[in-house]
Image (tube, rainbow, N blue to C red):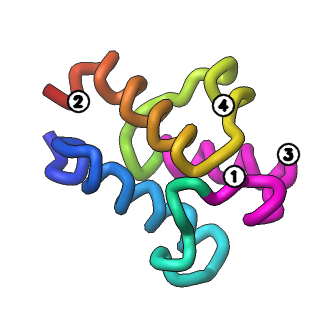
Amino acid sequence: MSDFLTDESGLEHQVKKVLSDYFSVSWTTIEIHSRLVEDLYVDSVGVVEIVMALNEAFGIDLPEEGVEQWKTVGDICELVNATARSLDRIH
């Protein structure tokens, strides 16, 4: 089991790191309440690329129906957490 999946703050940090790599900005500029469209200017292509990056980083396969509900970075964290837990990656 990966250490970053064992607690919420580690998960949040890792998600922010993936997003910061995608956006080429410091992870500290991305907040849990940052809105994907309004604040980070993510479009539909960006969502697909973020999903692929998260799937690779966490070794998961995010469900499409969950991704469609994303509005904030917090929503991403919740779905990554739920998906990883369903795969028994988090105890």
Image position of 48 with respect to 46: above or below: above
Label at residue 67? 4
- From which residue to which does the magenta span run? 34-55
Q: Identify the residue under disc 1.
A: 49
Q: Quadrant of residue 34?
A: bottom right
Q: CA distance from mark 1 to mark 2?
A: 23 Å
Considering the numbered disc 1 on the image, is that residue within a helix, a strand or a loop? helix
Residue count near mark 3 (Cα–Cα under 10 Å), binned few <14, some 14–19, many ≥20: few
- Which one is closest to the eye, mark 2 or mark 4? 4
Query: Which residue sits at x=46%, y=47%?
Result: 56
Q: Earlier in the sequence, mark 3 or mark 1?
A: 3
Q: Magenta stretch: residue 59 in it?
A: no
Q: Position of residue 77 (x, y in %)?
A: 46, 42
**Residue type (three-letter) at the residue carrying disc 1:** Glu
Q: Earlier in the sequence, mark 2 or mark 4?
A: 4
**In the displayed structure image, the side of residue 20 where residue 17 appears, left or right:** left
Q: CA distance from mark 3 to mark 2?
A: 28 Å
Query: Which residue sits at x=68%, y=18%?
Result: 65
Q: Identify the residue under disc 3.
A: 44
Q: Position of residue 60 (x, y in %)?
A: 42, 33
Image position of 6 with respect to 65: above or below: below
Q: Is mark 2 in CB contact (under 8 Å) with mark 4?
A: no
Q: Identify the residue under disc 2.
A: 89
Considering the numbered disc 4 on the image, is that residue within a helix, a strand or a loop? helix
Q: Position of residue 36 (x, y in %)?
A: 73, 53
